[in-house]
Image (spheres, grey):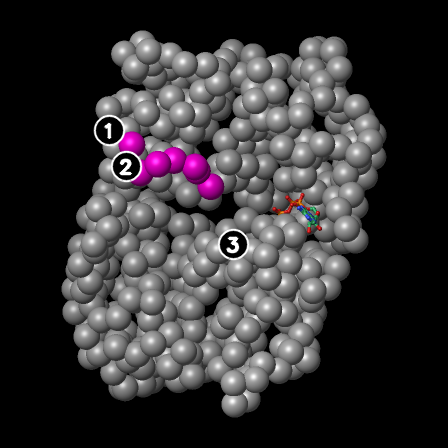
Amino acid sequence: MNTLLDISGLRKAYPGVVANDDVAFDIAPGEVHALLGENGAGKSTLVKMIYGLVQPDEGQMHLHGRPYAPTSPKDARAAGVSMVFQHFSLFEALSVRENIALGLDEAIAPRVLADRIRSVSKDYGLPLDPDRLIGDLSVGERQRVEIVRCLLQDPRLLIMDEPTSVLTPQEVNILFDTLRLLSKRGVAILYISHKLDEIRVLCDRATILRGGKVVATCIPRDETPRSLAEMMIGSTLADPPLRRAVPGRTLLKLTGLSLPTHDPFGVSLQGIDLTLHAGEVTGIAGVAGNGQDELVEVLSGEQLVEPGMIRLDNTPVGGLSPNRRRSLGLLTAPEERLGHAAAPDMSLTDNTMLTGRVRQRLSTQGFLKWNVASNFARAVIKQFDVRTPGVDTPARALSGGNLQKFVIGREVMQKPRVLVVNQPTWGVDAAAAASIRQSLRDLAAAGASVLVISQDLDELMEMSDQFAVIAGGKLSPTRPAGSISIEEIGRMMGGGDAA
Ligand SMILES: Nc1ncnc2c1ncn2[C@@H]1O[C@H](COP(=O)(O)OP(=O)(O)OP(=O)(O)O)[C@@H](O)[C@H]1O
């Protein structure tokens, strides 16, 4: 077989963890190759070495048969390797063209660049206007900016890290068409995703990592999602039944909840009505950037509104601080794990102080009780199977999925009466995602009310008792689960019509 990239004996160790151990695999031109593995298996570390962000301790890479050892992403791009990250680094106040210009390694005259953007985006079926401001674009369109930026450099290998987690079902189809076209033209694609169904539809081969080692290579089309997941975890999967409870009394009520935004690219919340009951999971679907972050901020108390717009057990809480709300039992886990949900440079113990201080009694008379905090952190790690050397590890050293498990576990274990979670399983592997969903359902079954905001429609369909769609800062009326199809929700999300 004709080989584009060939890797052998690659090793990378961090303090206390061997992230990649004797990793070998290869990719052919035009091949769509999946990289699979549970959280912390070493996928990001491997692609970071291929993209020149991290240097291996041992091992070799060959590109087109020649030794390849990039010491920076610029090196990698010059050799024909590009990467689209999960989180985009775009400036909202600049245009598409200006953003792309900033990311290119060579200077191109503005008009020439605009023409090239138009022609690449037309050629690959990724509609994009070079003059529009990033702040006015949907998340799917922003991703196109990143992809077009890569394509302008004519890559031979395109690395994509969880590209579909921010897209509507319709946008996923557009992206897959583009990736298939690229593959037909000989561009190889290295594709990281936890969505096993998508991998079976899209990818020619898969390399599976476990504990930093390659444990299997397979043709995903010949496997089932379950057999793929079992290869990842190295044992058979049990099917925990999801417990459903009968909805109880009203715990949280939003009435005419409105908040004008002062951010030119923010979304104003407009007259949101919503009732959450004890024992119930409520799902909110929506394309990112339609008011989800604003809603979470208003519910957490980072943004205050008129007291009566939010009632917890009939007590007006719209004007209360985050800590007051926490003490009453209204807890939130925001989407952005590094920086918002967790402080990157602080240890896991320190991070329990961020949200657990009040309910876990981690301080008395102004003194912080570190031993209680580290016991709590240890309990979260154990119950939520967070893979980390220990409670003193800084949050930024955890793999994305493991930090997510920690952040959700930290809130669930505080026994909230109402828990609001934004994208609870983003970046979390299939087995861990199932256990996070189960823990949220268990919380509801024990009498709490859980509000799940997510772009993953399958997740919402699986978990929710009732759900609604947020679009343009307005929330649709809630509908019982089972009364609406995924296609219908997808259209409501994409069309901006939430009524
Ligand atoms: N900068 C770092 N410092 C210390 N440890 C790290 C660092 N980066 C990664 N690790 C550790 O290396 C291991 C592999 O992490 P990596 O991010 O490659 O996993 P992953 O498969 O991409 O996981 P996920 O699916 O959760 O993103 C993990 O145990 C992680 O904690």
Instruction: Describe the element under mark 2 as helix, strand or loop.
Output: loop
Residue at image position (41%, 55%) is 454
Q: Which residue is mark 1?
A: 132
Q: Which dot marks residue 338?
A: 3
Tell me whether circle 2 and circle 3 mark residues in contact (CB < 8 Å). no
Q: Is residue 103 magenta?
A: no
Residue at image position (24%, 24%) is 131
* Badge 2: residue crowd in 10 Å (few <14, some 14–19, many ≥20): some
> Where is residue 141, by image quadrant?
top left
The span picked out in magenta is 87-94
Residue 30 is at least partly visible in this image: no
Q: Which dot marks residue 346?
A: none
Amino acid bearing label 3: Leu
Q: Which of marks 3 and 1 precedes in the sequence?
A: 1
Q: Which of marks 1 and 2 precedes in the sequence?
A: 2
Q: Which dot marks residue 93?
A: 2
266 horizontally vs 176: left or right: left
- Cα separation between marks 2 and 1: 10 Å
Amino acid bearing label 2: Ala
The relative height of residue 290 versus residue 248 in the rendered view (above or below) is above
